[in-house]
Image (cartoon, rainbow, N blue to C red):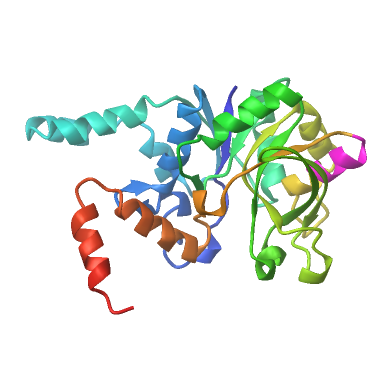
Amino acid sequence: MKAVIPVAGFGTRFLPATKTQPKEMLPIVDTPIIQYVVEEVVESGVKDVIFITTRYKRSLEDYFDSHFELEATLKERGKSKALDELQRIVKLARFAFVRQHAPLGNGDALLAAWHLFRNEPVLVAFGDDIFVGKDLVSRRLIELYNRVHAPVCVVKKVPKNRVSSYGIVRAKKIGPQTYQILDVVEKPSVSKAPSQMAIFGRYVLTPDIMACLQKLHPPARGKELGLTDGLRMHLKNGGTLYAYEVPAESHFDCGSKLDYLKATVSFGLKHKDLRHEFRSYLRSLEL
């Protein structure tokens, strides 16, 4: 199964840092957010990764390409460990890049790359969502898709006062960590939210979801076409949609400043060169 990673957003929540640097390239310790996303989908069995990007994000394309001058310098200076890591990144997968020409929503972005996976199910991984833990979330989604032969997504429980920030589902539980989704409400008020289960960052989409997005395209003037719009049309047309639930602590929404900080602390405490000194520093703080 191919993976599509939409990374065409402006990253406005991280301005001014993202004025000239893609949000997905912000580092968590010494590794950019996007590398964690790519490594997770590759470890789940994906060999082809399609990025949906824009002309403002050339640095992201360059990151997954060779840098001959830097590699030659590292080799000359005997920095074999750093050289091996740079060469490993380039070989993680077969990469392709497609540009979204206008900021018309993530549904429009997916349609920009549809010609590369038109008759296939595809894993969609948003570039600012990092999942951690022993279970590879993308692998679990692919396994669930292979059982139900229908589109699937990831959900997690969010605090009640945060439901208005996410797509919230109405669903029934059909097995361990598994739900059938009956409806999706985009950013509902607390009083109108059907649950506290929100969709996050990973999907396996089928051609019929893409067909729904195509029917809704182009969006009305001044509007955006969201993936949620396609999911809702699919459900209204009688289609099925399933979800895999993850623990809240296994996911970092790095489009959020708070979750970005949490991810930095979490990965810092696991970093083999920094963890002991960093842990001592945190314990020394008078919080």
230 relative position to 81: left or right: right
Prevalent SS, magenta region: helix
Out of 249 and 106, give the one closest to the viewer. 249
Towards the viewer: 220 or 95? 95
Q: Position of residue 51 (x, y in %)?
A: 54, 36
- x, y (%) of residue 159? 64, 65
Does the image show residue 266? yes
The image shows residue 48 at horizontal and vertical percentages of: 52, 23
Is 187 magenta? The answer is no
Q: Is residue 26 left or right of residue 188?
A: left
The quadrant in which the C terminus is found is bottom left
When the figure is inspected, residue 181 is found, relative to residue 45, above or below; the finding is below
Q: Quadrant of residue 5?
A: top right
Q: Which residues are magenta?
A: 231-238
Outermost front residue: 176
In the rendered structure, the answer to whether residue 217 lies left or right of residue 90 reads: right
Furthest-left residue in this view: 77
